[in-house]
Image: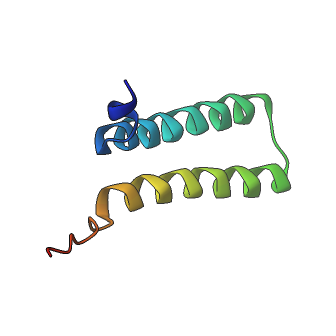
Amino acid sequence: MLSFLKSSQASYWGTTALVVVASAIVGREAAHGMDATQWLCSAFAILGSVSAAVMVRVWPEPQKIDD
């Protein structure tokens, strides 16, 4: 179980879930009505979660040093 948590697949699925949950929360709150400050903060929340997902997928793997 712990090996899956340390794998790259866990980070892929975790950041995907983060984007979906953040978008769902923002969409639900937008349906109830938001002011300008809430719109700005929700845009930053979505941008942050998408940025995390992109970083997980694009960031290069660490180089292994052979002895």
Can you give x and y, in whole percent of width and height, for residue 6 in the image?
Answer: 38, 41
Q: Identify the residue at horizontal 26%, vertical 64% (top origin).
A: 61
Q: Depth check: 13 or 67 in front?
A: 67
On screen, residue 61 versus residue 39, left or right, reads left
Q: How many numbered marks does the figure carry?
A: 0
**Which color scheme does this rendered protein use?**
rainbow
* Looking at the image, residue 58 lies above or below residue 34: below
Can you give x and y, in whole percent of width and height, for residue 15 in the image?
Answer: 45, 43
Quadrant assignment for the C terminus: bottom left
Can you give x and y, in whole percent of width and height, for residue 18 in the image?
Answer: 52, 39
Residue sticking out furthest to the front: 67
* The quadrant where residue 9 appears: top left
Can you give x and y, in whole percent of width and height, for residue 52 in the image?
Answer: 48, 56
Q: Identify the residue at horizontal 65%, vertical 51% (top origin).
A: 45
Q: Identify the residue at horizontal 45%, vertical 37% (top origin).
A: 14
Q: Depth check: 66 or 9 in front?
A: 66
Quadrant assignment for the N terminus: top left
On screen, residue 54 versus residue 58, left or right, reads right
Q: Identify the residue at horizontal 31%, vertical 41% (top origin).
A: 7
Q: Depth check: 5 or 59 in front?
A: 5
* Looking at the image, residue 41 lies above or below residue 18: below
Residue sticking out furthest to the top: 1
Residue sticking out furthest to the left: 66
